[in-house]
Image (spheres, helix red, strand yellow):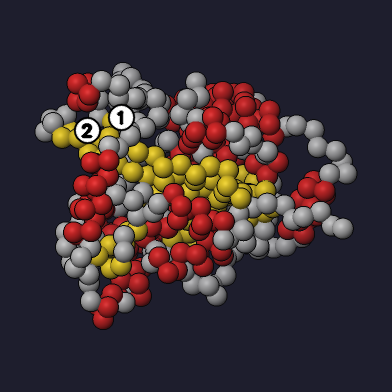
Amino acid sequence: MHKIRSLSAANLAKAVYRFIKRPKTTGGRPSAPLGSRILTNPDDVFKHNMWDHIQWSEEEKKIAKQKAQENSCVKIPITEQGKFDTDAHCYWDKFYERHQNKFFKDRHWLFLEFPELLSSNSHNKSIPKSDHQTETCLSGRSCPDLETSLHQQSAISSKHIPDTSYQEVSMKTNEDVLQNSAFPGQHAPFRILEVFKYLNILHFLNFFFHYMVESDAFLYCCDFSSCAIEMVKNHQDYDDSVCHAFVHDICEEKASFPFPPQSLDVVLAVFVLSSIHPVRLQGVVNTLSTYLKHGGIFLFRDYGRYDLSQLRFKKGRCLSENFYTRGDGTCVYFFTKEEVHNLFSKAGLEEIQNLEDRRLQVNRGKKVAMHRVWMQSKYRRPFPPLPP
């Protein structure tokens, strides 16, 4: 078992910031904070690899829409589409066997964009929903650093709630029931479910063992690829006292999770839901949402409509509108802001954040600029109405 540091809230915030901002190479300078690099002069476009908050011209929107229409005009025959759903786990097993941990880039930005992952009191938060805060601090953009963001959230979380508060009584009752249950992590006061994506889990494992075990947080991680779960369990930082990795297909409505409903503080789905057939998405989000505590948060990041990766598809790779299959058999859907809102709202969750993240990715060597579009959202399970 790793040696656990004893950290105050302030020191924890500093440790997190150092962890995610450390340079990738010895002596290198940390990259600019997410969302802080704005292109104000078109002549500067090739000075950096990425520009944030890019506004598309009407001509660019028209061209993107036209490209998507062109590459989706020839669809895979219905008789051949079934295998991409029924054999999805096979395609992803092959994907992980082929790429291991070399495909996905490091995602240290997770803790900047989603500081809710660090709080053991996320179910007590009441984050103001002003347009300014939604577009800046919550998305990790205009905030000076993560430490400031965490202190702000800590101050919000620590507001006094009277002993007679209905929300407090409701949460305590729910926790008492859970503590009497028998499931992995039942004694942890803060529980996170990370769905799919092998590399995300590795970052969590590293972070948990160095900074978060003292907070009694517990991490669940699932994938329907047995290959991915096996790699996670074989990782040097894996310890089943604070983490439980298991094979699970979230599209199977009757498949049970190793924890009861209303037991999770956070559900995290990063570039995951896009791999699911659109007709199954609502059922998946509905199911996952039932496992959130009242006040628990669903964190989501995925591909946005007309992202570069959508426009690059060739004819004959389209399964249905804005849903494609790659050459290796894995699938991807491209969301709009309105679709994301409807998806989570129909699951009974309330919006905290729903952003369309538009960036300009630059290949300075080839002098090529490419539009990237990602969705980033946070939705909370509300408390039940007060009894009459």
Residue at coordinates 33% horizontally, 43% vertically from top-left? 373
Residue at coordinates 16% horizontally, 63% vertically from top-left? 315
Question: Would you say residue 376 is visible in this rendering?
Answer: yes
Q: Residues within 10 Å of mark 2 (few under 14, many from 20)?
A: some
In this orientation, which residue lies closer to the viewer: 30 or 376? 376
Q: Mark 1 belongs to which amino acid?
A: Trp
Residue 137 higher or lower than 379, as above or below: above
In this orientation, which residue lies closer to the viewer: 61 or 352? 61
Where's residue 167, x and y in %? 78, 47
Q: Which mark is residue 331?
A: none
Where's residue 112, x and y in %? 48, 33
Residue at coordinates 26% horizontally, 81% vertically from top-left? 79
Q: Marks 2 and 1: in contact by CB < 8 Å?
A: yes
Which residue does the numbered mark 2 point to in the structure image? 362
Question: Would you say residue 200 is visible in this rendering?
Answer: no
Q: Quadrant of the N terminus?
A: top right
Residue at coordinates 45% horizontally, 68% vertically from top-left? 280
Q: Mark 2 belongs to which amino acid?
A: Val
Horizontal arrangement in the rendering, residue 262 relative to residue 200 (left or right): right
In this orientation, which residue lies closer to the viewer: 135 or 203? 135
Residue 236 higher or lower than 233, as above or below: above
Tell me which corner region of the image, top left, top right, bottom left or bottom right, holds residue 81.
bottom left
Q: Quadrant of the C terminus?
A: bottom right
Residue at the far bottom in the pictured view: 79
Q: Secondary structure at mark 2?
A: strand
Horizontal arrangement in the rendering, residue 339 relative to residue 118 (left or right): left
Which residue does the numbered mark 1 point to in the structure image? 51
Where's residue 255, x and y in %? 53, 72
Q: Secondary structure at mark 1?
A: strand
Where's residue 316, x and y in %? 18, 66
Horizontal arrangement in the rendering, residue 15 relative to residue 357 (left or right): right
